[in-house]
Image (spheres, grey):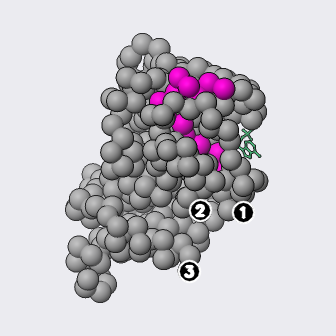
């Protein structure tokens, strides 16, 4: 692989967040840039909420091609975009900004795309899931929202379970309203089930997705391991937690003979549309990419 080749004509992009020091995006994009011999750079940009708009206008003025946007700016990024894709409109947030030559800003929400791609590369086909039954999502934060919308787009019904039941009910209502308004389709198939009894429902579920921080190293309960004994033999179990790469949930699912999908794939695949827009190349998430990012994660 060739080294960095940043000239006076380099294409520039970055990730805006606060904090941003833990972001793996610079490692990932600069790896792809070097691997494809592209004259470009991708930098971390730590920006306070009150400085977000100033930073965006400054990056545009300085000739950046665009930026990824992470916590706490995803709603502000939605607001500043002149035009957003349908997924971003339904999700109400944007993680990828593209600065166009005419001065306008395009916003996209690529987390859902990343999630679906992470299933597909593991051989899990959304139409097969849709035919087998609804997906059950655990959690009611921003990640649950993006994943729920992307599953609905694939024709997969969604059930939501969250410790704080009111948040699950609010999320279901707001996705349904946004879906009906922006997707121009009839009501979204989103229902809520109880946090205390979702394990009992697993028999009729095609896909289980953990979007909470349960099972995460350093999180509220790293040893979290729900009861999967009622799962059908074709249940797919996925976790968006990627530290550790194999969470106790995924280990337990594998021990039950169930197919599993880890969280690193979503993180890597969601970066592909931005890279394409800013740097002009289609990139792959192969084993070498995964190894490179994991090495940075453990550094
Ligand atoms: P995101 O990062 O996706 O935007 P978040 O708002 O940080 O999400 O939420 C994290 C999720 O983990 C929430 O669904 C949270 O449940 P509550 O809404 O009840 O807070 C869930 N979560 C965190 N700790 C938990 C725990 N100990 N038990 C159950 N759920 C938990």
Tags 1 and 2 touching, CB below 8 Å: yes
Left or right, residue 122 beside residue 211: left
> Element under label 3?
loop
In x, y percent, where is residue 159? 57, 25
Measure the C-alpha gap from mark 1 to mark 3: 16 Å
Q: Which residue is mark 1?
A: 218
N-term-proximal mark, 1 vs 3: 1
> Which residue lies under the disc numbered 2?
243
Q: Residue at x 50, y 53 (%)?
A: 263
User: What residue sits 44% from the left and 52% below the top?
Assistant: 266
The answer to which of 2 and 64 lies nearer the viewer is 2
Range covered by the magenta-colored residues = 200-213
Judged from this view, the residue extending furthest toward the top is 186
Q: Is 231 included in the stretch rendered in magenta? A: no
Locate ligand 1 by image quadrant: top right
x, y (%) of residue 12? Answer: 35, 70
Is 9 on the left-hand or right-hand side of 263?
Answer: left
Q: Quadrant of the N terminus?
A: bottom left
**Mark sitting earlier along the chain (1/2):** 1
Of 237 and 159, nearer the camera is 237
Residue linked to disc 3: 299
């Amino acid at each position: 692989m060739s080294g960095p080749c940043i000239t006076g004509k380099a294409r520039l992009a970055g990730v805006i967040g606060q904090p941003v020091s833990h972001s793996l995006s610079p490692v990932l994009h600069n790896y792809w840039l070097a691997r494809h011999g592209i004259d470009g750079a991708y930098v971390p940009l730590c920006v306070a909420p009150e400085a977000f708009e100033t930073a965006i206008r400054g990056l545009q003025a300085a000739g950046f091609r665009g930026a990824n946007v992470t916590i706490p700016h995803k709603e502000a990024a939605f607001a500043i975009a002149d035009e957003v894709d349908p997924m971003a409109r339904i999700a109400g947030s944007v993680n990828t900004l593209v600065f166009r030559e005419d001065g306008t800003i395009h916003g996209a929400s690529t987390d859902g795309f990343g999630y679906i791609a992470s299933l597909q590369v593991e051989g899990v086909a959304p139409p097969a899931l849709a035919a087998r039954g609804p997906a059950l999502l655990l959690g009611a934060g921003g990640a649950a929202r993006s994943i729920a919308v992307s599953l609905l787009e694939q024709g997969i019904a969604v059930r939501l379970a969250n410790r704080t039941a009111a948040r699950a009910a609010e999320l279901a209502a707001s996705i349904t309203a946004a879906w009906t308004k922006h997707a121009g389709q009839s009501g979204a198939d989103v229902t809520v089930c109880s946090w205390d009894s979702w394990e009992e429902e697993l028999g009729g579920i095609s896909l289980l997705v953990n979007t909470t921080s349960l099972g995460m190293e350093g999180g509220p309960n790293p040893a979290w391991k729900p009861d999967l004994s009622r799962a059908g033999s074709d249940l797919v179990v996925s976790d968006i937690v990627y530290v550790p790469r194999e969470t106790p949930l995924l280990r337990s699912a594998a021990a039950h003979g169930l197919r599993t999908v880890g969280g690193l794939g979503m993180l890597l695949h969601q970066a592909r549309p931005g890279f394409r827009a800013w740097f002009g190349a289609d990139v792959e998430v192969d084993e070498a990419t995964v190894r490179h990012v994991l090495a940075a994660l453990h550094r």
